[in-house]
Image: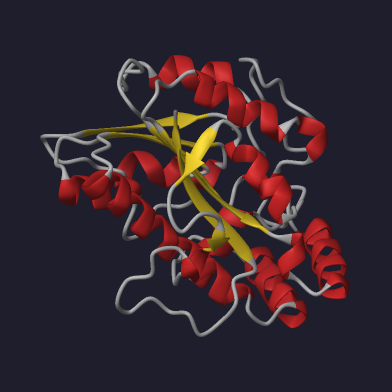
Amino acid sequence: MTSDGSAAPADGGTAGSLPFDTSVAHQARMYDYVLGGKDNYESDRAAVQAGIAVWPDMAFAMRANRAFLGRVVRYLAAEAGIRQFLDLGTGIPTSGNTHQVAQAIAPESRVVYVDYDPVVLAHARALLISNEAGATAYIDADARNTGTILSQAAELLDFSQPVAVTMLALLHVIPDSDEPYAIVAKLMDAVPSGSYLAISHSGTDLFDPGMNDTFKGVMNQLIQQRYTPRSRAQVTRFFAGMDLVEPGLTAVEAWRPEPGTDTAGSSFTYGGVARKR
């Protein structure tokens, strides 16, 4: 997504990098604040507090989404046998990153991260350090620049072998005008049968209708991205032509919960994993 919210090409063009504007909140830095990080600014903290004022479970949802990432990667590495990961919308590195979880199970795992926020970029090269057996790489690109992403990811990943594509809390900041379904389709067309897609996405039909409109309005006034929650049917459409892994599309906190999983709140966020036929 370009810095002014306009469309960037989904077929390999180059989107402009976001300006380093700390006066406007960014989702990655908001997550960093909620998760206890130090790479956030007053605008990010204010946006989180404004969101919580409308939706008290907002911080729970962010933590639940991060925990969902860990469970998804553990499933993919341990049960599905995946050794290659393409993680779009990486966010600011913190504990339990995709490569850390995957390589703890399978040290040879290879992970390519994709994000476009300059704060993420500044930290990624220093913090996303792989072990000797596996490998990680970072692509500074807009998620809509699928051609650029796929060509650069191919320098580390073997697209003749299964790849897990993860897009957590990403697609709900890509508006319909930027063709999010086409973005997902192009990425999944590039990977072979046996690959996986993991998505988490804010759900309109999980919110009270009035709260949904209010929260959406607050976020679109405060953050750089365009917040676009979608219904269950709309989120399911991202998995077209794939087989959803049990338990299917659920709230993220309800997807294969492990001992200690916090289910005391409501994330209002769908999560699912599907296998490409």
**Would residue 210 be found to the left or right of residue 99 on screen?**
right
Q: Which residue is rendered at x = 63% and y = 73% of the image? A: 58
Does residue 91 appear left or right of residue 178 in this picture? Answer: left
Find residue 207 and report its horizontal and vertical position in percent: 75, 71
What colour scheme does the image use?
A: secondary structure
Would you say 79 lies left or right of 71 here?
left
Q: Which quarter shows the C terminus?
A: top left
Could you say where residue 36 lies in the image, as x and y percent from the top left?
A: 44, 72
Q: Is residue 232 visible?
A: yes
Q: Quadrant of the N terminus?
A: top right
Q: Is residue 240 above or below residue 187?
A: below
Residue 156 at what x, y percent from top left?
Answer: 30, 21
Comparing 112 with 163, the one in front is 163
The number of numbered discs placed on residues in the rendered structure image is: 0
Asked if one can make out residue 1 in the rendered structure from this viewpoint, the answer is no
Seen at 43% across and 48% down, the residue is 245
In this view, the residue in front, 63 or 266, is 266
How far across and how far down the image is residue 239, in percent?
58, 38
Q: At 68% across and 58% down in the image, what residue appears?
A: 25
